[in-house]
Amino acid sequence: MKIVIQRVKSASVSIDGVIKGKINQGFLLLVGVEDADSNFDLDYAVRKIAQMRIFSDEADKMNLSVQDIQGEILSISQFTLYAETKKGNRPSFSATGKPDFAKAMYEKFNDSLAQIVPVKAGVFGADMQVELINDGPVTIILDTKEARKNA
């Protein structure tokens, strides 16, 4: 899984002009799945995201997790994270997970994360408009393939 983690003051996702999900302080996640992903990847990503300490404490040090601040998560499926751009000017998406598998993994990821922190989500495969107020900005890329290699 490839996940872009953005620390936000607020974020929302709309589909056809209707707000589907909206959060206050927390994370906006852009979530990509590949066919090689497994429960290991899912569990690793959930644990890392829930425990990642990138919110400021009273000394203004990044020392608090999304749980510590009682934050929320807005999760958006994002197959384009697996774009291959080596050849030509049009990206290839052949490394992206097959839709049925990717959707199941994305939904399982959201369900697992929701057991720890409140999660709102976009709609898999939908044309979505995402608005956010990036806080910092703080943006981190999590690639579970690295953890899988070392497991």
Image: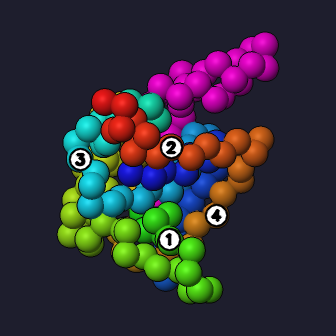
Rendering coords of residue 100 (x, y %): 21, 69
Give the mark toward the camera: 1 or 4: 1
Callout 3: helix, strand or loop?
A: loop
Q: Earlier in the sequence, mark 2 or mark 3?
A: 3
Give the mark toward the camera: 4 or 2: 2
Q: Name the residue type under label 1.
A: Ala
Q: Are marks 3 and 4 in contact (CB under 8 Å)?
A: no
In the displayed structure image, the side of residue 107 where residue 90 appears, left or right: right
Label 4 belongs to which residue? Answer: 131
Q: CA distance from mark 3 to mark 1?
A: 20 Å
The residue located at (62%, 86%) in the rendering is 89
Query: Residue 38, which numbered label?
Result: 3
> In the rendered image of this protein, does residue 97 appear above or below residue 92?
above
Camera-side residue: 76 or 40?
A: 40
Q: Magenta stretch: give its range.
A: 50-76
Label 2 belongs to which residue? Answer: 142
Query: Residue 83, which numbered label?
Result: 1
Give the mark toward the camera: 3 or 4: 3
